[in-house]
Amino acid sequence: MSEEMMQRIIAYWAKRADSYSKLNVEELGWGMNEKWLETMEACFPDKPKDEIRILDIGTGPGFFSILLAMAGYRPDAADCTEEMLEEAKKNAGAYREKISFHLMNADHLGFADETFDVVVNRNLTWNLQNPCVCYQEWMRVLKPGGKLLVFDANWYHYLYDEKAKEAYDRDREAAAKEAIIDFNIGDNYEVMEEIALDLPMSKKMRPMWDKDRLLGLGYSSVEICDDIWKTVWTSAEKTNYASTPMFRIAATK
């Protein structure tokens, strides 16, 4: 991984930690928590909650880890940005003691082999410099039969595809027409576009690209759900992100 690019990514998310954290806190009150939890738990092993080891990699302000802690799990939450981890700890409130927080890079985890039953992340993989290295590292820390759950979208594909850019612009128009908040407009968003131009996942057609790479790395099976967004997104998200629907990847070690 390029150290220069890594520092660019960390600097961006460190600066955006406060605003992103506020959005995550608001999201906890949007009424979709049970849907998100049900979607994850559908892929969990059939054993008591206190026996299921879960790693939330790229936790950001802690959305997944907080939901899991509220449901009775004791997740490990890892992020490469100190500022994000501080926001996650604050947001966890009374559930903070149920979450173990770790400052770690996604491609080099300080955990032993075969530690976790589940590795989960959301809106992380598009942001990776070396996704295959990360997918292999996540497989390393999974137990045999463990699950990798990836929730993501082709967020910045519009930077490379004219039709995708036209659809992205229509999303902005739709958000304005419906007079709802536009999640793609804000401070330093242009900085992330500049970074995304240099990230490999912006150019890929996902999730099929991921499926091929995951199988090639040795995951035993990979299941794709292209319409998970219908279950876990609010109406405002569906309007904002119509051109970039969220998918779920469930890969088994």
Image: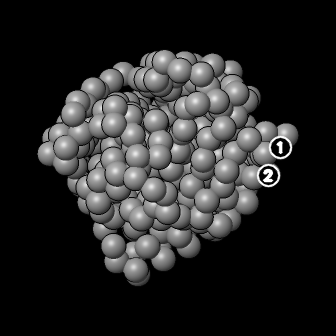
Q: Secondary structure at mark 2?
A: helix
The residue nearer to you, when weighing 214 against 240, is: 214
Above or below 245: residue 183:
below
Q: Is residue 73 visible?
A: yes
Residue appearing at x 47%, y 42% in the figure: 116
Way the structure is coloured: one colour
Locate residue 25 relative to residue 76 in the image: left or right.
Answer: right
Q: Is any part of residue 188 visible from this angle?
A: no
The answer to whether the residue labelled 1 contacts the one labelled 2, judged by CB atoms less than 8 Å apart, is: yes
Q: Position of residue 133 (x, y in %)?
A: 29, 60
**Residue 237 pos. (x, y %):** 53, 30
SS for tag 1? helix
In the image, is residue 215 above or below residue 203?
A: above
| Image point (64%, 30%), residue name | 50
The structure residue drawn at horizontal position 34% and vertical position 51%, both measured from the top left corner, is 140
Which residue in the protein does label 2 denote?
90
Q: Is residue 151 left or right of residue 47?
A: left
What residue is shown at x 66% (from left), y 55% (from top)? 101
Instruction: Rate crowding at label 2 as few (under 14), some (14 to 19) or many (20 or more) other CA atoms within 10 Å.
Output: some
Q: Quadrant of the C terminus?
A: top left
Q: Amino acid at mark 2?
A: Lys
Q: Is residue 115 left or right of residue 18?
A: left
The relative height of residue 91 versus residue 1 in the rendered view (above or below) is above
Against 178, residue 82 (above or below) is below
Residue 25 location in percent, x, y? 73, 41
Q: Compute the Cα span from label 1 to label 2.
A: 6 Å
Query: Hey, which quadrant is residue 248 in on the image?
Result: top left
Tag on residue 93?
1
